[in-house]
Amino acid sequence: MSRIRHLARLGAFALTCALASTAFAGHMPPPPLRIDPLVEQFMSGNFIESASLSPDGQHVASVAQIEGSYFVFLTDTNTRVARLLSAPRSAVLQQRWANPLPVMFHPCQVAWIDNGRIAINFLARHKEHRGTDVVYGEVVGLDGKVLRKLGHGLLAIQRDDAGKPTGEVLVNSISPGSYVDRINVDSGETHSYEFNPPGMQRLERVALDSHGQMLGAQTADADFFSDNARFTIWYRRDLASPWQKVDERSVTDDPITPLRVASQPGHLVVLARNGADKKAVWDYDADKRAFGTRLAADDQDDIEVPRAHVDDTAVVGFPTGGMKSRTIWIDPEMARLQAMVDQHQPDQVNVLRRVGAGIVEVTSHSDTDPGTLSVLDVGSGNMREVLNFRPDIDPKRMQSMQVLHYASSDGMEVPAYLTLPGKTTQPPPLIVLVHGGPISRDGWGWNEDVQLFAAHGYAVLQPQFRGSTGFGLRFEQAGFQQWGRRMQDDVSAGVRDLAARKVIDPARVCIVGTSYGGYAALWGLESTPELYKCGVDTSGVSDMEQQVTSESAGSSWRATRAMWKLWLGDSDKDHDAWAGLSPRLHADRLRAPLLIVHGEEDRVVPISQGEKMRDAAESQHKDVQWLSFEAENHGVVRVNDRRIWFGAMLELFARTIGEGEPPVPATPKMIDAATTRAQANKQQLWLPGVHAPGTEPAASAPQ
């Protein structure tokens, strides 16, 4: 796990329901809103976010999004018939130091306690509530009836020596002064779990033994005014033993992440580099405070934190980073099953999880398939698909994602993903899609943005510039304090490489990104105007000093400011350098049309960053369009907002680099659906290849 994920634990779901309004402003009048059949194929608004197989393999509980809200469904794996189990609900949040706050709780996570009971965690955030997301948990039966409340959400399920649930669970405590409670699901009896670290600490992770007992934990210094922001690992041998501090380090140090409590007393299983370039899984002696045997590693890529399942007590499989994730097992039987499934489905990433005796859950996805869940019967070797995460997506209409490498300006090798729009009659136009973070990364798999652009005939390049995670410490650190410098060079080098090899048309390139990617889009237009014919900045930073010194992204917390200093440099010492790399201050360099998009509720990069960039561009009489969404936070996630967002981008592309050659034409069914929607909303229907009035490509754009 990268350090940014410890500090910026953003909600993974768009948990708002009101329709967003939009506003355009700028020197260039906005294009007409259009309904595009090739966009509509991605805009169903219905998909499965996550799923969990029951221990007996008879049911799947899934969290599904339907038109922006989240629901829990229960699917019979034999009949594949699904029924509603839980829905969003309104509630009033009682606050200790403020007035009660009305919120809407949405289910966000499910876990099986046993074959007949399911724990559901809910998440709520009110647009006026600027604190941490509120989590609430409950246990329901297969009929959806609520059987037990679970405080602020399930943490772990307790098990006996045979691995069977005992009926007790660990939950985030609702009691003042307590972190964790133990609840008997049958009786409701509740006991405070003895974990009270000194000072102001925030519980980051728990480490469980094979029985689901919390014998390890990691906390973060939660004192906003402390200059000593640190991560601490705690351990105790058994429930009767006192907690002891076994590791403490600054948030800017390379982290140690506790994964679970080892079977050997006094030992933890941790993820760390231990002086090496790549993250690996290690045995850690808590008494000696020393690393022992390396348990799992990969020569090429980091090992990453396993996908979290609160009903898991023994983590024995570890995913790799790199360009295409694999699982490294320390359990020989699971390694054998992994090899068997991979041989059966070689073009997919297959993630296995043992859920019960002889039953393994297999979640699979690829670059053209959003994902499926299958049940593997270990005894017979039979595997059957029981759930499709996006049944509206036809993998045969999707385009393959290639992996490539190229040399940057200083010779560093940069990995990237390239998606081509099928076989075109001429080199296609290119969209450079820059990921956010920037201490983050893209992954090999189905990506809605990529596939939507490719469906319109655009090639898509996703550079994993230095600073991206998963490729080792040296590659990550090479991006420190390189915003607008070497990181930007890595992006530019990818465009030049594709142009030199005649893979794309170098006269038809646009750059697009969200968050850090938005910054890269802005700076790409200003620092290398010869490369790009247009750009789209969504939720991007335009003024580096304002971002670090404002109240955004938790910058009032000194731990966050320490990380910003590590990534960007010292604001006191590097003021002039930051000014030289802040797009807002260099809007006079813009030569290509620019679309700026921002959510009015953005808490990570304030909307003022976008507004000031817009104003600076307008003051220089540049071709700039402005699109804001009332109910969006960081990025654009709501279905109708995304429809408008993609429409605005595609209008810009058509005007500046011309239309591509769609690899697969819209079907009559898609056109009929889009026509119906356009008529119902009195909007314009647009068909790729037929220019809408007023949106004909510029004369300079190749046809």
Image (cartoon, rainbow, N blue to C red):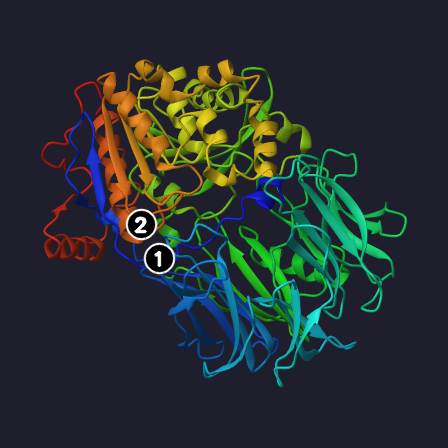
Compare residues 598 and 132 and report the one nearer the observer: 132
Few, some or many residues within 10 Å of mark 2 (<14, 14–19, 20+): many
What residue type is disc 1 on? Thr
> Does 290 appear above or below 672?
above
Using the rendered view, name the quadrant where residue 679 is placed: bottom left
Left or right of residue 617, residue 465 in this image: right
Using the rendered view, name the quadrant where residue 635 is placed: top left
Looking at the image, tell me whether mark 1 or mark 2 is earlier in sequence order: 1
Quadrant where the C terminus sits is top left
**Mark 2 and mark 1 in contact (Cβ < 8 Å)?**
yes
Q: Secondary structure at mark 2?
A: loop
Measure the alpha-carbon separation of dots 1 and 2: 8 Å
Compare residues 438 and 219 and report the one nearer the observer: 219
What residue type is disc 2 on? Ala
> Does 647 appear above or below 571?
below
Q: Secondary structure at mark 1?
A: loop
